Amino acid sequence: MKEQENPEEQEAPETQEGSKEVKGMKELVEFIAKSIVNAPDDVTITEETDEQGIVLKLQVADEDKGRIIGRQGRVAQAMRTLIRVKAAKAGTRATLEIL
């Protein structure tokens, strides 16, 4: 009986840890974006939750969009991959939209 009670008690810390992972995704994207662009003050990230998971919306200055996207979208794809990994660890789904 005690073995069955322990998994229930362990679910709460995992949920709290998962929320830390979600918060970390926004900080990760912000750090990467500000490191790449010429105008780091213009970087804004909004976080929304919908039925498919978390949507991070990254907005940068118009002249910095090319830097964020990268050649053939490599930088954007790398950022999306990192977000997906962090979301999987948190047990959720996440996407990145570049506005």
Image: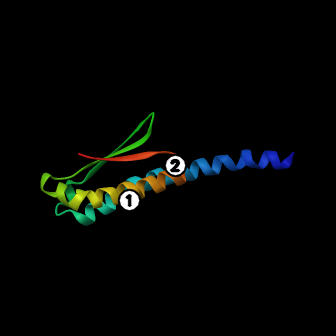
Q: Residue at x 18, y 54 (%)?
A: 65
Q: Position of residue 73 (x, y in %)?
A: 26, 57
Q: Of all residues shown, which one is farthest toward the left?
A: 63
Q: Position of residue 43 (x, y in %)?
A: 24, 54
Q: Callout 2: few (<14), some (14-19), or many (20+) C-alpha neighbours within 10 Å? A: some
With 5 as the anchor, is 23 left or right in this view? left
Q: Along the horizontal axis of the image, is 69 left or right of 13? A: left
Instruction: Tell me which corner region of the image, top left, top right, bottom left or bottom right, holds residue 36.
Output: bottom left
Whether residue 55 is visible, yes or no, is: yes
Asked whether residue 70 appears in the rendered view, the answer is: no
Find residue 19 and name its label. Answer: 2
Q: Viewed as shown, does residue 66 lie left or right of 7?
A: left
Residue type pointed to by label 1: Leu
Crowdedness near tag 1: few (<14), some (14–19) or many (≥20) residues, C-alpha within 10 Å? some
Mark linked to residue 28: 1
Q: Position of residue 42 (x, y in %)?
A: 20, 54
